[in-house]
Image: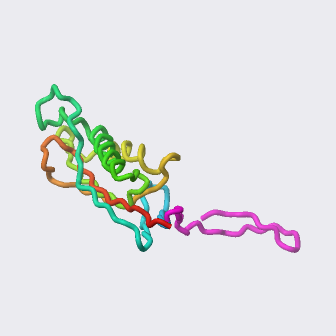
Amino acid sequence: MRLSKTLLSAGTLALVAATTAMPLVAKAETGIVRHAEGDFPISTSIEVPAGASTIYLSGMGAPVQDKTAPPKSLEAYGDTQTQTLASLQRIEAELKKLNLTMGDVVQMHIYMVADPRTKQLDFAGMMKAYTQYFGTAKQPNLPVRSAFAVAQLANPGWLIEIEVTAVRAPKK
């Protein structure tokens, strides 16, 4: 709850409670409306206008980061933060081929495997990489997002795989 001061007509001072439960709504020039609540860098819902094209990108993991490491090993691909950043770079490159940007992403699914060294998901490491692309001054558009813990991914060296859905707004 936020308190604000209001001057009454009689000149007395009163404290008036004002709630901040209203969700933040951002409507882009494209007609896409993103609803967000709180400070967590994801949208709670997104409205896409009629006539928009939907683009589905397949899940992408990180490319090999260390070619001297054993193939398909954790050492070859890096930790969760490194893999998330590399996966997002691949996604960005694929979107660019389609004349889209990360700002056009409306939905993201992140599949995560526990790091075999710690037996834990590195959610914080994933978020450090994610927030380099989403919710920044340069790129404020936030997708709706789900993150899943899975037993394993197709590549035994991957700790993360990301798939996205992007939208190309209708031409005016």
Residue 93, relative to residue 103: is it above or below?
A: above
Q: Nearer the viewer, residue 31 or 69?
A: 31
Q: Position of residue 17 (x, y in %)?
A: 66, 69
Q: Position of residue 160 (x, y in %)?
A: 24, 47
8 falls in the magenta region: yes
User: Residue 139 vs residue 105: left or right?
Assistant: right
Would you say residue 80 is visible in this rendering? yes
Identify the image quadrant of the N terminus. Answer: bottom right
User: Residue 37 vs residue 76: left or right?
Assistant: right
Q: Position of residue 30 (x, y in %)?
A: 49, 63
Would you say residue 147 is visible in this rendering? no
Q: Position of residue 126 (x, y in %)?
A: 32, 45
Q: Residue at x 77, y 67 (%)?
A: 6
Q: Nearer the viewer, residue 142 or 58?
A: 58
Which residues make up the magenta segment?
1-30
Q: Residue at x 38, y 57 (%)?
A: 105
118 falls in the magenta region: no
- In the rendered image, the residue lying farthest to the right is 10
Q: Nearer the viewer, residue 97 or 20?
A: 97
- In the rendered image, the residue lying farthest to the front is 172
Residue 121, relative to residue 172: is it above or below?
A: above
Q: How many marks?
A: 0
Q: Residue at x 12, y 43 (%)?
A: 156
User: Residue 71 vs residue 111: left or right?
Assistant: left
